[in-house]
Amino acid sequence: MNITVCVKRVPDTATRIRIAPDGCDIERDGVKYVLSPYDEFAVEAALQLVEAAGQGEVTLLSYGPEATQESLRSGLALGAHKAVLLTGTPDMDGWATARVLASELADDDAGLVLFGVKAVDDDQQQVGPMVAELLDRPCATSVAAMDVAGDAVTCRRAVEGGQEVVEMDLPAVATITKGRYEPRYASLRGIMMAKRKPLVVKPAPEVAPGIAVESLAYPAERPEGRIVGEGTDAVPALVRLLREEAKVL
Amino acid sequence: MADVLAVAEVRDGVVQGVSREVVTVARGLADALGGRVDAAVAGGRGAGEAAAALAEQGADRVLAIDDAEQVDVRAVAVAEVVRGGDYGAVVFAATGPGRDLAPRVAARLGVALLTDVVAAEVDGGRVVVTRPVFAGKALARVRALGAPALLSIRPNVFPVSDAPRTAQVAHVAPSGDASAGGYRVVGFEESAGAALDVSEAAIIVSGGRGMKGPENWHLLADLRDALGETAALGASRAVVDAGWRPHAEQVGQTGKTVTPKLYFAVAISGAIQHLAGMRTSGVIVAVNRDAEAPIFGVADYGIVGDAFEIVPELAAAIRTLREQ
Ligand SMILES: Cc1cc2nc3c(=O)[nH]c(=O)nc-3n(C[C@H](O)[C@H](O)[C@H](O)COP(=O)(O)OP(=O)(O)OC[C@H]3O[C@@H](n4cnc5c(N)ncnc54)[C@H](O)[C@@H]3O)c2cc1C
Ligand SMILES: Nc1ncnc2c1ncn2[C@@H]1O[C@H](COP(=O)(O)O)[C@@H](O)[C@H]1O
């Protein structure tokens, strides 16, 4: 079975975010980019499933700027077989992104299409289930572990209070969260081999936007806090402040 | 003029508290759009009657969608309700179940979904929202271009307000068939201890690597218990990576984003990825033995000292207070 993993290039989680002069985007210069952390779990899940089956290929699919090629090469270095980049700017528009990705996936023969549970830049948790609807395939979200048997996949979903077990007929879609899959590191050999793996770059199809970003702003600074004191002596004062000043107890 | 649909959340037949926030937001939008609020309740039988109480927050009508337990069936049913009405906006809760449901409904309707909304208004007849992006390092003001506007609201952000009506309950049967979609819920395994999800708790007691090991978590659990049943345990990633606590409790950029009214960060340094998940909490209390720890930069109140001494004292003092 072939597996396609949709991956997004996002600012590194430690990067400082500065708003661009136009007020609608962030400064892109000087930002360090990575594959979104949950997408790394999804890539790992795909590699493990294909390895366990002893056959099949893992394809990476991304919609983003030209520079995304770098992130795709890093995914190929982990063991994915090939990659496709649809060039364009996703602009925080999950519905537009879903339609772009679905257009490419419509004739894909993958038994499973995997997503991260969320991209850590716009954090929408929506692209995976939207693509599934567009492709008319079942979709399990927030999946911590998967097992394929025959024409079905059993997913363990991380939900409130425990794990829900869901069975889906293939082909199917899943969004992956932290659980069974610990992302591997690229080996030197993997990095060398990645350079020769196929990476197709083509413009993304035009889709009408679903949203318009009007402006970006910095969140209000938290008011200056205070150290109530040191050691257990400070406990009564803290409790009094929480009750009388903050009124939360 | 347009109506607003509030999609209530039901679990095990119980209408969840966050539904009142959803209806409150829907009421505000409906007043601006000059329409009615319908509360859709998709769950087991009987949930519709229980949801009649949502009239308190301004629901004019309750639409009980019976026998739509599974998310794929619920999505079909909610989309049908939306198509059958004249809705300018549909409001969901950005909880686990809400995040699972809302994008499916959006795709079925062919419109965008604005998730994790922290402010919503009507401007020029259109819904415009504010939502955090880049892990809360910026806030985006976003306009929905399609109609209706679909949004999911972050729990604990919108104060519930009362706008009482008397709501009739109408029952709707979904046309979807639970077995047709190739999706089957076949089991559930409860995990120990996680009574209340960290992303929905009003109070969170989070522990970091400075707690030294899972065997010391009873100290934090005791503080949680002292704070009452709206409190839950949280953890830093260092703790989750070490296998001391489950990932479900992780707060931060690769864990849950939380907005409780009170957040205790105990023996947590305050790395940027942790702050990303909790900096919009109402009141933040930090306990750390290092006075230079970055967590004190966002804390409203801090105590410098040893968590092993301070936490039990704190639990005792809060118990005494609550018993008064
Ligand atoms: C891609 C990425 C994603 C990440 N996502 C997350 C995330 O979602 N959530 C998250 O939390 N982190 C995340 N991190 C990790 C983050 O960078 C930090 O490593 C992590 O938050 C540190 O956890 P900690 O504060 O518990 O541990 P430490 O940084 O080790 O801090 C322990 C603290 O405990 C204090 N201490 C020690 N002993 C005591 C005592 N007896 N009493 C009181 N205080 C004591 C110390 O002074 C110190 O401040 C992420 C990192 C990356 C790279
Ligand atoms: N531009 C994109 N290109 C490829 N995959 C994407 C893109 N945006 C989102 N995704 C996928 O959808 C998941 C959820 O994204 P989001 O809905 O934005 O939180 C991500 O983890 C990716 O797997």
Image: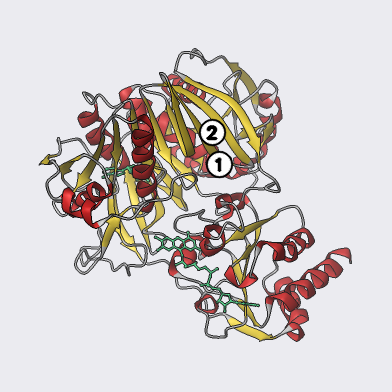
Residue at 25% x, 59% y is A25
> Mark 1 belongs to which subunit?
B
Number of labels in the image equals: 2
* Label 1 CB sits under 8 Å from any ligand 2 atom: no
In the rendered image, residue B235, in percent from the top left (x then y), is placed at 59, 61
Residue A25 vs A211, above or below: the answer is below
In the picture provided, is B54 more to the left or to the right than A78?
A: right
The residue tagged with tag 2: helix, strand or loop? strand
In the picture provided, is B274 more to the left or to the right than A185?
A: right
Asked if badges 1 and 2 are on one and the same chain, I answer: yes
In the picture provided, is B15 more to the left or to the right than B35?
A: right
Residue A142 vs B171, above or below: the answer is below
Name the residue that disc number 1 marks.
Answer: B22
The amino acid pointed to by label 2 is Val
> CB atoms at circles 1 and 2 under 8 Å apart?
yes
Report whether residue B157 is seen: yes
Name the residue that disc number 2 marks.
Answer: B7
> Mark 2 belongs to which subunit?
B
The amino acid pointed to by label 1 is Val
**The one of A32 and A165 positioned closer to us in this rendering:** A165
